[in-house]
């Protein structure tokens, strides 16, 4: 933990987790978070989803649900930001409390239920981002009480495709009734057919759950390839509770994030990379809190990585630390650039993936 954040963290912990998060957003919005400028290391430059990024470390969905602070993310060192989840209509989400710190595990449990200001407010904020050179992904979700959840995704994709660099279709939310209906083959097939007609040339990725069954994994990856989806974000929070958890809040309902999901996410990342022969651009997310974690995700098949929970426990200076460690590890292992390390743990497959 950097010094100022180490002093602040115990004070933040006295507040309900969601209040602390709101304070963080307000501080970011008003430029109150220290952001010492650091030069970018060329070894971290990466090409993904048709764009050049200064580095592969991104902000995960859920932190900036209403697209309020994404413009501050490059100053924190992030190479890209995923905003949302956004739904077509504004909705309040679940009753509070709905976000819990598991301090001993450096983890969170959330059952937010897609609280957000809705598509129109979100899109108007993103309109200001046009031409600023940032890589912004939008995370799309259906309204909780939607009569036609697939149509919700279509509405969102049509409006947002011209405004962002990547559309992420969240088919993995553990906290709403229809959050996971598109994990099944027929609904997903239909959804991807309908989205192809509205997304234009904007790249699209599916965000998946670490709790998928083997059958769901093969259905989703097969459909992603068949519909020419560009990538997958692996993975969302888990509804499972590893036996290693120590914190009092472990029994709360919702999705668990942070180090306890790291192994699950990384294992799924490797499986998806293998199943898709490196033909999709993968974003590794789940429990990443060090350069070594980011490096392991990249070697397992990720071109980009993301984090959320680690920001809560380590503060925003963590991003620079992760990048410095990652650059060191790449050089230590003889890589000249990051792309060479993508999928390196898969041996021959990695070489095929890069030339495919
Ligand atoms: C409070 C909270 C809200 C989240 N909201 C979303 C969301 O709206 N859409 C989504 O796809 N993922 C959401 N996530 C999941 C994260 O994007 C990420 O996949 C997960 O937390 C694992 O990464 P981490 O361990 O670095 O936090 C949320 C996570 C948290 C903690």
Image (cartoon, rainbow, N blue to C red):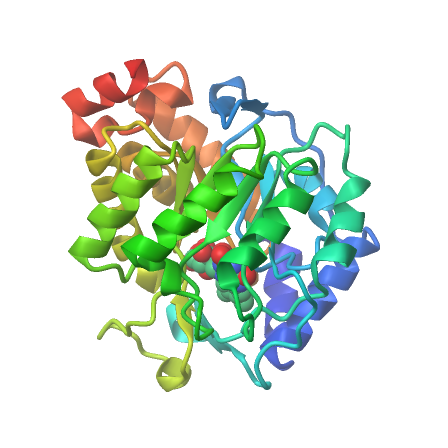
Q: Nearer the viewer, residue 313 or 51?
A: 51
Left or right of residue 109: residue 2: right
Could you say where residue 138 lies in the image, as x and y percent from the top left?
Answer: 60, 47
Instruction: Identify which residue is drawn at 75% across, 44% down.
Output: 126
Q: Residue at coordinates 32% horizontally, 24% vertically from top-left?
A: 341
Is residue 175 or residue 317 the one in the foreground? Answer: 175
* Quadrant of res 24: bottom right
Whether residue 1 is visible to the viewer of this picture, yes or no, is no
Image spot of residue 43 (x, y percent): 47, 20
Q: Is residue 180 left or right of residue 42?
A: left
Above or below, 279 against 319 in this view is: above
Q: Residue at 76% across / 56% down in the picture?
A: 120
Picture coordinates of residue 148, whole percent (x, y):
52, 65
Q: Residue at x 80, y 55 (%)?
A: 29
Where does the N terminus fall, quadrant-wise?
bottom right
The answer to which quarter of the image holds residue 287 is bottom left
């Amino acid at each position: 933990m950097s010094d100022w954040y180490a002093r602040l963290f115990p004070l933040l912990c006295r507040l309900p987790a969601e209040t602390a998060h709101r304070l963080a957003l307000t501080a970011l919005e008003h430029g109150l978070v220290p952001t010492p400028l650091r030069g970018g290391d060329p070894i971290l430059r990466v090409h993904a989803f048709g764009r050049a990024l200064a580095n592969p470390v991104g902000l995960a969905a859920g932190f900036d649900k209403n697209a309020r602070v994404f413009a501050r993310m490059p100053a924190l060192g992030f190479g890209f930001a995923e905003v949302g989840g956004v739904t077509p209509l504004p909705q309040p989400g679940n009753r509070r409390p709905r976000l819990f710190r598991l301090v001993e595990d450096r983890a969170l449990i959330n059952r937010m239920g897609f609280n957000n200001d809705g598509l129109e407010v979100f899109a108007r904020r993103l309109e200001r981002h046009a031409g600023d050179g940032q890589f912004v992904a939008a995370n799309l979700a259906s309204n909780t009480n939607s009569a036609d959840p697939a149509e919700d995704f279509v509405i969102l994709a049509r409006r947002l495709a011209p405004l962002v660099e990547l559309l992420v279709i969240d088919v993995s939310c553990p906290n709403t009734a229809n959050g996971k209906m598109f994990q099944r083959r027929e609904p997903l097939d239909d959804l991807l057919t309908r989205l192809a007609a509205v997304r234009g040339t904007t790249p699209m990725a599916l965000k998946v759950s670490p709790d998928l069954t083997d059958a769901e994994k093969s259905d989703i990856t097969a459909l992603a390839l068949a519909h020419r989806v560009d990538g997958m974000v692996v993975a969302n929070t888990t509804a499972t509770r590893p036996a290693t958890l120590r914190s009092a809040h472990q029994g709360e309902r919702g999705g668990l994030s942070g180090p306890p999901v790291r192994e699950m996410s990384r294992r799924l990342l490797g499986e998806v990379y293998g199943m898709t022969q490196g033909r999709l651009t993968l974003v590794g997310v789940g429990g990443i809190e060090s350069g070594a974690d980011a490096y392991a995700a990249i070697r397992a098949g990720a071109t980009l990585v993301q984090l959320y929970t680690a920001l809560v426990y380590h503060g925003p200076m963590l991003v620079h630390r992760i990048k410095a460690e990652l650059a060191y590890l790449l050089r230590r292992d003889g890589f000249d650039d990051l792309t060479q390390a993508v999928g390196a743990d898969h041996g021959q497959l990695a070489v095929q993936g890069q030339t495919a």
